[in-house]
Image (cartoon, grey):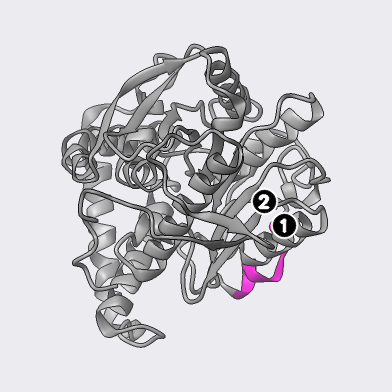
Amino acid sequence: MVMGKRPDVARSSWPVAATDMAGLVGQIGISMLQVPFRRPWSGEGGVARNVAVAVTRQTVRTFMGYSTSLPIEQFRSIEVILDDLCTVVMPPAVRAWNVSHGHGEVAGVAGEWFRPRSDRSGGTILYLHGGGYVGTSPKMYSVFIAQLARRTGCDVFVPDLRLAPEFPFPANLEDATAAGYGLIDDGIDPQSIFIAGDSSGGGLVTSVVHARIQEAHPRIAGVLLFSPEVNLRLDCPSVRDNAGRDILPWNIPTSSYLNGIDPGSSQVSAISDDLTGWPATFVSFGSDEMFRDAIRRFSTHLHDAEIDPVVVLEEPGMFHVFPILLPWTDAARRTMVAAGKFVRARLDELGQAEDNASDAAVVGDGVVEGEDVVIDTPDPWASVPG
């Protein structure tokens, strides 16, 4: 369940929540008035694409700035409203990807299951959602996860993670680790399991992998990282240089999550970790995001550690988690198709693929080759110009 519905988490009264939502709508309206003055039509792509990028950037920035300025109980109430809204509007989009969706529990950790109805690959993905370690919920990710399930042919479990500040580190790591072990205890072969995540969820993926390597647990099939937060020191030049182009706030908060942990610790910042023994890795990010330099360094460390395969996709002109926020763009489509090929190729290589899996293959230094992932349901974004 969303954090605000947990019995031990406080939230504001409905009149306060209603006024907060009215304030949010008003702030977004004001921010939209600023968009024409920022020359949204200019940029590397077409006019429609550039305007959509500018509007998305402005909307997300405004939402994040406004909501995180509120007391935590009011922030949680807004989350509950948005989560309830997603319960209504997301299911049709999930069905459009020919994916089933339902509640579930793994090792006592509640969450949401997404399962492709056809073209199954035989894999399972544990997906750790982003949200700055403090917000969002599995339901809010429904459309993105449905596409991920469809592209990869995998069942995807998205756990309801405990979040800061009510539950600082290592609460979310405990939840994610329990869910991962639970999948194995339920009879799923570790070599058919992938761990994936975006933003802070991507950072949490690296914490899970770090813990697994330290404890010498069986290797998994691989990891998929979308704009992962791999350096909580936030000291790379792109944090400053891309602040005007990204959706993230210039003052990215981490203290409520870290709870006194050194932000440079390898437990929470993969850029500081020894990556020897890491599983096969897929990394996607944009050239305009604040985490760009840290992700580049992390990717270089993977290659230096001779991890194979490593697939790294940096999309020019794209900001943080663009496959989630701009799923109709060509950049997002390329990313998701490549992610699907990566997963199916790994399953085939490890002998875990089902008979109807794609014949994509990963060769050489991580270049993805092969036929496009077969989707017997039309891509819902195919008719949208990207």
Q: Position of residue 127 (x, y in %)?
A: 48, 36
Closer to the camera in the image, 310 or 108: 310
* 308 lies above or below 326: above
Tell me the quadrant of the picture where the N terminus can be found.
Answer: top left
In the image, what residue occupies the spot 75% across and 52% down?
271
In the image, what residue occupies the spot 53% across and 72% down?
288
Q: How many marks?
A: 2
Residue 199 in sight: no
Mark 2 and mark 1 in contact (Cβ < 8 Å)? yes
* Residue marked by disc 2: 230
Q: Amino acid at mark 1?
A: Phe
Q: Position of residue 99 (x, y in %)?
A: 26, 37
Q: Residue furthest front?
A: 355
Say what secondary structure mark 1 lies in.
helix
Give the image quarter of residue 262. Answer: top right
Give the image quarter of residue 167. Answer: top right
Tell me the quadrant of the picture where the C terminus can be found.
Answer: bottom left
Q: Position of residue 221 (x, y in %)?
A: 61, 37
C-alpha span from label 1 to label 2: 7 Å
* Residue marked by disc 1: 298
Query: What residue range appears in magenta?
Result: 234-241
Closer to the camera in the image, 272 or 157: 157
